Image (cartoon, rainbow, N blue to C red):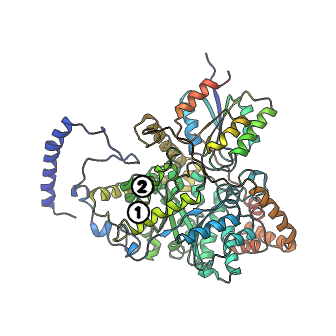
Amino acid sequence: MFDEEKLKHLRNAKHEWYEGLYKKVTQKYPERKDKFVTGSNMEVEPLYTPLDVKKTDYLEKIGFPGQYPFTRGVQPTMYRGRLWTMRQYAGFATAEESNKRYKYLLEQGQTGLSVAFDLPTQIGYDSDHPLAQGEVGKVGVAVDSLQDMEILFDGIPLDKVSTSMTINAPAAILLAMYIAVAEKQGISSDKLKGTIQNDILKEYIARGTYIFPPEPSMRIITNIFEFCSKHVPKWNTISISGYHIREAGATAVQEVAFTLADGIAYVEAAIKAGLDVDEFAPRLSFFFNAHNDLLEEVAKFRAARRLWARIMKERFKAQNKKSMMLRFHTQTGGSTLTAQQPDNNIVRVTLQALAAVLGGTQSLHTNSRDEALALPTEDSVRIALRTQQIIAYESGVAETVDPLAGSYYVEHLTDMIEQQAMEYIEKIDKLGGAPRAIEKGYIQQEIQDSAYNYQQEVESGERIIVGVNKFKIQETPPKDLLKVDPRVGELQTKKLKRLKESRDNVRLKQTLEALREAAKGQSNLMLPIIECVKSYATLGEICDVLREVFGEYKPSVSI
Amino acid sequence: MNKKIRVVIAKPGLDGHDRGAKVIARACRDAGMEVIYTGLRQTPEQIVETALQEDADVIGLSSLSGAHEHLFSRVCELLREKNAEDILVIGGGVIPEDDIPALEKAGVKKVFTPGTPTKEIIEYIKANVKK
């Protein structure tokens, strides 16, 4: 990128500065630490200059927004054209309660919905299942059947909003319900916009809401890819997630590496199932975390975009530009929130949200200050949303594309993260790909090691967490936390009982049997699932049929 | 010579957040304890059975899903039924302060909230375990 002769001068000048002024000053006034590192423990030099990016060919490695390798962003105009989608993840208790929260958020200027389901829903149990006890409606909304889904989106026109659903193992069923609700609103499936998370590999790695073993799980996922490419073309069929991998303790490099390794596995599975890469790859989307190290995080997003573009082009021979674009949602880092002095979390979230925006995110969830304590209150959620709006409308960072490009430090970090993530991906390839590496426990172990190191750094004081291991105060526990009505379980159970008495149980049996036969064979499961959903089969009933055919995943654990 | 303290670290319910549980399991092991980690999705019955089979001195329960009241209390209840109340039960996770008195009444000896150093937990175990 630079003239050889000028670089030589620069190298000499830098050497002079370092040996002269810098050493003189640091001998007299030592720096604060012997070694400086990023949030993910990458070593940081005192100064970055053009020497650190001298090998970077601008056109090849950085380029222009909207063009390969998309380092600067996936859209040519980025936020000058349209701001990112402000999408707060929400849902608790019953469909009725959550429907109210969605309407509140839309009134407050939120631009997309993001549905949180409770754990029984995510693991395919109805609210009256013994294992659901104590969990119904706690971390999200309880959805037992199409009936709940109808209530959840009541009065929300599904052709006007885009909806993201954090659902994985039973993603096909919830998508089927969404399609059925839309149909009742008179909206055909080709008009629907949104995302299902549908990323089972990271459930095995880090999040834990798996149901079926890897093979049938991958089949369902590729069935969804195929179905949506024909019938729900605007739907993001998967959100390949680094978020939870990072929450489990991974570093920024590991987050990129393990997420893209999972992405590679999905692409391979779909190609193996006979799909054309350019048919499904444009609908793949990603989901990343944003932690506190602002510049490292910005570099991480840029590196992930560049690396994915290269993988799709070179490894999978994609032709369509859209297949190479890494489009992503970001959520600020839940694990960085502190229970101590919770208002400080507003500031952390601001830094993290800023990183996501400077990193070119397509949509963003900002966490609320009280989430280390409980589900957020309406007031806290409003501040979190306002944080995004202030960044969007007041900070000025949205007025030009990729404003940190060209920073010697940020470009250097981008290169480093890309390179180290690629090394991990090569290692995972050698192990036989992500599913094998998960089976061997390799990825989990790498993450656990990082989590343990982090904890030790915090405990030794090497890593400062404001309000936790430094700048502590005596404080009284915060009041007014959100508490989910403990009767939600009972309410859902009663609803289920009424549903089972009122539906056409003959038709129900037929649709469930049709699904069983389809599952035993090779055909696409989406249509039979849609039939089950429309006959008001419960989520648990549908999952039970699939459990009987596919079996259940049994993880191996080690510490 | 002192017998090693035996600890069962357990994830009751459907919650998948196991970072904390694993970090604490490892910290206890590094502190010289014998640690059994149950993995995810354990019923209170399974946890108590594991603790009895493993002759545990301590059960550490972790939940971040808000189901702690039901699940932690049930573990304590089952221990009483099995006359195994001498097993020290501690808990942690996303647990609002307001919920702690009820958990303590149910039989959880100590609840550690986010930000607690692992050292503090280890010291607590060493000081309170019945030997």
Q: Residues within 10 Å of mark 1 (few under 14, many from 20)?
A: many
Q: Amino acid at mark 1?
A: Leu
Q: Is residue B121 left or right of residue A39?
A: right
Q: Name the residue located 73 percent from the left edge and 40 percent from the top edge.
A: B73
Q: B71 or A71: nearer the eye?
A: B71
* Up/down of A466 relative to A189, above or below: above
- Percent of width and height locating residue A353: 44, 60
Residue B64 percent coordinates (x, y): 62, 48
Give me the residue at 75% from left, 29% from top.
Answer: B85
Q: Which residue is mark 2?
A: A421
- Do discs 2 and 1 share a chain? yes
Helix, strand or loop for disc 2: helix
Query: Between A263 and A362, which is closer to the camera in this rendering?
Result: A362
Mark 1 lies on residue:
A307
Marks 2 and 1 close (CB-CB < 8 Å): yes
Amino acid beneath label 2: Ala
Quadrant of the rendered image containing residue A464: top left
Local packing at callout 2 (Cα closer than 10 Å; few below 14, some 14-19, many 20+) is many
Q: Residue at x 48, y 64 (%)?
A: A386
Give the quadrant of the N terminus of chain A: bottom left
* Residue A197 visible, this angle: yes
Q: The residue marked by circle 1 belongs to what chain?
A: A
